[in-house]
Every structure is written in C-alpha cells, then in structure tokens.
Amino acid sequence: MKIHQLSVFVENRPGHLVAPCRLLAQAGINIVTLALAETQQYGILRLIVRDWQKAKDVLQASGFRVTITEVLAVQVDDRPGGLAEVLEPISAAELNVEYMYAFSMKANEQAVLVFRFEDPDLALRTLQGSAVNFIDTVELFGRLGPV
Amino acid sequence: MESPSQARNPDGLSRDHLPAEQLAALQVQRLRQTVQWACDRVPLYRQRLAAAGVAPDEIRSLDDLARLPFVTKEDLRGAYPFGLFAVPLDQVARLHASSGTTGKQVLVPYTRADLDVWTEAMFRVLTWFGIRPGDVIHNAYGYGLFTGGLGFHYGVEALGATVIPASGGNTDRQITVLQDFGATVVCCTPSFFLHMADRAQQMGVDLRALRLRAGVFGAEPWSEEMRDRIQQAAGIEAFDIYGLAEIVGPGVAAECAAHQGLHVLEDHFYPEVVDPASGRSVPDGQPGELVLTTLSKQALPMLRYRTGDMTAFCPGVCPCGRTLRRIRRISHRSDDLFIVHGVNVFPAQIEAALLAVKGTLPHYQIVLSHERDQDQAEVQVEITPEMFSDRIGVLEELQGRLTRAIRQAVGVQLGVRLVEPRTLARSEGKARRVIDQR
C-alpha cells in the first residue's frame, strides 16, 4: 500500500526549483504530483513519479540531495466533505499527520490524498477496516492512465 | 651546498636520528653558509643585515639567528617576480608559484640542487608514512605551478614506489582510478579527499573496501576531528604533512606513525616559534607563529621567513626515536582570523564545531558581509545525505544544533544556512573557507 515519495533539497532562490524539474523532463519522467514545503532559506520538493528509482538516480547523479520516504495514498470523492471524512478516523486513532497534500483526478471525479505518517505501517494497521480507502501504486498509477 | 648525489643518498635517512650536538653543528655550518650566500647575492638581504649591524661571519651559533631581521610575505610580493632570486635565471631549473591563498602569488625558483634537496625531503617523509617500493601512490595534488603535485611525484619516484599522477579535479574519474589502479596511498588536500569520499558514497563506491591503507594530507589547516572523519570514511591512516612554496613546497615537516606532532626536517629548514606581536621566541609548548630559515637552498634562500602559520613546539622526544623537533599541527594561519561582533574567530573553530554535530561533513564556507552597519558572518553548510530529511522540522532542528555548537565554540552567534551540495566553491586544490564580501 505504501508509495515512494522523493524529497529534494532546493535553496529558496530564483532558478533553483526549475533545475531538478528540467532534469526529470530530460529523462522522460512525468511528475504525477508534487508539493513544496518552504522556509525562508530553502525548501523541500516532494514528488510522486512512476519510476522513483530512476528519478532518484538522475537527480543524485547531478548532485541533488534526495531522500525516499514511504507515504500513503488515499482515494476520496472529489466533493465537499471528502477530506474531512478521511481525517476524522485518523484523528480518532490519534495518528499524527507529519504533512499531507492532495491532487484530483478529473477523469473519475476522485481525489487522491497523500499522507506522511511517522510510521506508515502503524497507520495502515490502525486504519484497517475504517472508511479510509488506501490505494497502492498499481491502483494509483492505473487510474492515472497509460504512461 | 650539498651535491645532488649526497642529497639523494639513502644515508640521508640517518639525519632523522642525529644526536642534538651533531645536528646543531650541521645547522650552524649551513646557516653561516646560507647567510653569506644570501648577502652576497640578494640586495634586500645585504641591506637588511647591514641595517641590523650583522655581518655573515658573525654567525657562530644558532642563537645568533635571532639577530637577523624577519622576511615577510610582503617582502616576497614586493620583490615579484625575480627580486629575491640569488642565482641568475639560467641557473634556475624550475619555477613554481605559491598558490596565492592569501593574495598575490609569489614566484619560487629552484636550482637543480634545490630540487634535489626537495626530493630528498619528500623521500624521507614518505618513508615515515611507511611507504616503500611496491606501494602505489595516487597523487591528487594539482600538478602545475602549485608545488604539491610535483613535490610528491619526485619523492615517490626517488623512493622507488609507483606514482599515479592523477592531479586535481575530475572527481568521478579519480574515484574510478582509486578503484581500478590499486592505490595503497592517496595524497591530496583534506578538503578534496572529503569531497571525493562524499562523491564515492553517491556513486555507491565503498572506499573502505579498496586497497587504500593510508592518506597524506596537507596544504591547508585541518583538525583532529577531520582526521577522525577521514579515517572512518575511508578506513585509512591519515598523516599530516606541512610545507609552503616559499620554503620548498611539501616536505618541510610531517607526522610519523606516532601522530604526535610533525617532525621538521630541520637539517634543511630551521624552525623557530615566535610571539607574532613581539617577534620573540616562545618556550616549547607555547603557541606562536612558525618562522623558517632555509639551510641548504640556493635560488631562494629564506632567512627567518614569517610563515603566518600558528603552531607550537612539542616538548619532549617522540616515541619513534627521530631526533628532529616536532611542531603541533598548524591550527590556523594568522591571517585566517576574522573578527565578528568584536570576537576573534578562526575557521578551524567553526570546523570543529560542525564536525561535533553528528552527520555533518565539513563542506562549509564562512561569508562575511557588512549589513545594517555591522559586520555579519554566515556559515554556509552543504547538506549531506545523513543530514537531509523530508521533514522541515528535522532540518530546522539541525540548523539549531549547528548554530548552538558554533556559538559554544566561538562565543558569538553566527547565522547558519543550509545550502545545496556543490553550491560552495569546491576546492579541487585548497579550500577557500572565508569569503569576505565586506
């Protein structure tokens, strides 16, 4: 159920965000979704791509600091209340969300929420049988259509 | 002056063990010759000695050395390019230049005999590191005007070991060569070696699994903490070597296997440690500035050269049995000092603080600027794989730890900025630690 997320260190200065994106483009890697966490001085670019191993190699070969984190993807209806219905059981289980981001899939009126828990396995076990609908890599990328 | 054949004679090894009186007798004899030589041939020395009221034939003991005036880097720069040469250009076999770490370069000439002295010095110190014929030495010091590359090169050849003239730069290729050519010893600046270790890790190469057993590092000040880090990263024994182009290049002083200070090759390069302010000698164990006098060089004799390098004589005798006096590893250059918020700071203090925080490799730079009517210093630290996290909170916490460690070490709060790898000017020669934008 776990999905590999790439995190890339980028300085918070003009031109620094485009460099890793251009490298991925040159390698023919499409970014499924991304989120940027920033401070005044630097940011962390978090990316989901199909071929995370290749993306990691490409970025590291050019000297970027990259780390791989296991995150969980949850599918929800793309409508008011969709997010709250997922957060409620997480909150009830007293699981702390380190961070999260979301993207929508136009084709089927669904949205995908990406969650970073400190311990993804614990989160998976705890939320088993709840209303939270985890999807794995195959489902996620399957729904996004052919490469 | 010694003939090339004598200088190269492996007999020279016994000079590491001369009894004190014999060594002193040799030093006085050579000192008198050198002072005479310099006075006869270099106007600046003739004028300075006359002004100090010293005649060369009055040099009868090593204590008389203190009567001679100092020579400084400014004197060398003022004489650029040929002003201090003691031989005509047609007797100069080679020209090197100081690396210009702290300003304008200085031109350094060698006669054939000077090159032999240098090679003998390197030959001797290489044996201290346990290097023997059969060893393969990967020499990643820059070949060129910088003395590091060729100094090691000829020393290794004289010893009969194998030299790989890798020179500096092209890190990925260096790592491939380290892997494939079976080097047993690597020589380069400590900062370049850490850069290679970092890159090797990225390339999935384990330096500890190679044949490499020792490293010889010099040409910039480095710390004990950095030695630990290098030894752990590569599974090697790290030796410190000291030298400077103005005197000869690498081979002025080096560690033996005891790692308790650097023996000075004082039969060729006579050391003093003086109080930088008063110029007076300080007792053994007391810190001061290293002053060197060449005892057997022809083309550029140096009388009491103020090196700007801060050290101290190590008291007592070395367990290795060599009688050559030892100096402590160079803690810093006197001109590395910068002042921020009224506090004196040396880059070495910052390096030690950064290293004390787990997981930080010291690719760092100190940027001095003038903002809001005040001098500001910012320590820029390149993020390592161990430091990096997908969580902002972890990075902020790290930044806090680095800031506290530096404040503890230098007594003043400096800004700490995390930067991308290889953002900082990468020294493929010498590390440039302080960038002054004031």
Image: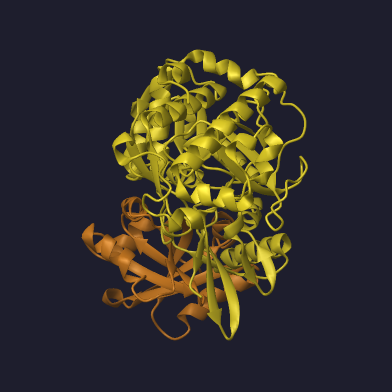
Chain colours: A orange, B yellow
The picture places residue B352, in percent across and down from the top left corner, at 64, 52
Q: Residue at x 65, y 27 (%)?
A: B324
In-image side of A131 versus B398 (left or right): left
State the residue in front, A101 or B194.
Answer: B194
The picture places residue A59, in percent across and down from the top left corner, at 34, 56
In-image side of B102 versus B19 (left or right): left
In-image side of B340 versus B165 (left or right): right
Judge whether residue A144 can be spotted in this image.
Answer: yes
State the residue in front, B74 or B203.
Answer: B74
Number of numbered discs: 0
State the residue in front, B14 or B361.
Answer: B14
Q: Residue at x 78, y 42 (%)?
A: B283
- Point out the image quarter for the C terminus of chain A: bottom left
State the residue in front, B118 or B304.
Answer: B304
Q: Residue at x 37, y 57 (%)?
A: A137
Judge whether residue B238 can be spotted in this image.
Answer: no
* In the rendered image, the vertical position of residue B160 relative to residue B166, given as above or below: above
The picture places residue B221, in percent across and down from the top left corner, at 57, 47
Question: Residue A145, located in which quarter of the rendered image?
Answer: bottom left
- Point out the image quarter for the N terminus of chain A: bottom left
Q: Which residue is drawn at 71% across and 23% down?
A: B20
* In the rendered image, the vertical position of residue B225 relative to residue B417, given as above or below: above
The picture places residue B163, in percent across and down from the top left corner, at 37, 26
Question: Residue B343, located in which quarter of the rendered image?
Answer: bottom right
